Image: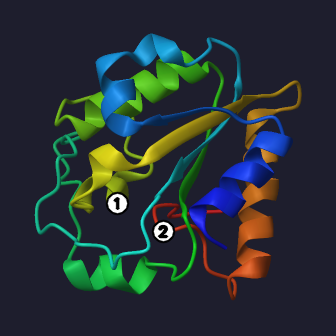
């Protein structure tokens, strides 16, 4: 599925935003304060260019970078979905995630592979406020993704 098709499905499912990482870094207040789920999408069919050292910050003094081989092993061909996350407060969580991507020390290590993509600032962020528990919605979304991609998780999701 390409980016446009995936975006259309997400829009029909109530996702909003669809802003670049760069824009969200500059203006984190674009995201709502409500609980919900968020997705990082890549709007490029080009092969990814991986960085030895990404822009992610060190959380608890742990290096967020992994080997290029590990990034390649986790790459999911033909999927614009890079990461699926959850938040009890989308604005706060996405703000942390963007700060982490700017090399700052914050309590958000999830999705760190994103920051080793050369085009990470051009990735697209969308979100969906939820009434249900965001963790349950996230788990269902990851399971659905796995069912369509040979049991692989989205590129930057390290757990179900």
Q: Nearer the viewer, residue 5 or 110?
A: 5
Do the residues bearing badges 2 and 1 touch, measured as CB atoms within 8 Å?
Answer: yes
- Eyeballing the image, is 151 above or below 61? below
- Eyeballing the image, is 3 above or below 15? below
Q: State the SS at label 2.
A: loop
Q: Nearer the viewer, residue 27 or 100?
A: 27
Name the residue furthest left: 53
Measuring from the top left, give residue 38's x and y in whole percent: 62, 39
Q: State the SS at label 1.
A: helix
Q: How many marks?
A: 2
Residue at the spot 67% in from the left edge and 73% down from the top edge? 1
- Quarter of the image where one finds residue 137: top right
Q: Residues within 10 Å of mark 1 (few under 14, many from 20)?
A: many
Which residue is tagged 1?
113
Name the residue furthest right: 132
Q: From where the camera sits, is residue 49 visible? A: yes
Q: CA distance from mark 2 to mark 1?
A: 8 Å
Residue at the spot 51% in from the left edge and 83% down from the top edge? 77
Q: From where the camera sits, is residue 107 visible? A: no
């Amino acid at each position: 599925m390409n980016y446009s098709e995936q975006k259309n499905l997400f829009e029909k499912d109530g996702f909003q935003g669809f802003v670049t990482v760069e824009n969200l870094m500059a203006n984190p207040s674009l995201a709502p304060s409500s609980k919900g789920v968020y997705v990082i999408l890549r709007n490029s069919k080009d092969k990814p260019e991986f960085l030895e050292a990404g822009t992610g910050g060190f959380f608890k003094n742990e290096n967020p970078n992994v080997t290029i081989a590990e990034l390649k092993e986790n790459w999911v061909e033909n999927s614009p979905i890079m990461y699926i996350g959850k938040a009890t407060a989308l604005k706060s969580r996405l703000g942390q995630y963007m700060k982490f991507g700017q090399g700052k020390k914050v309590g958000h290590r999830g999705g760190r592979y994103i920051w080793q993509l050369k085009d990470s600032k051009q990735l697209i962020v969308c979100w969906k406020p939820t009434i249900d528990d965001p963790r349950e919605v996230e788990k269902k979304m990851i399971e659905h993704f796995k069912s369509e991609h040979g049991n692989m998780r989205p590129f930057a999701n390290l757990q179900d």
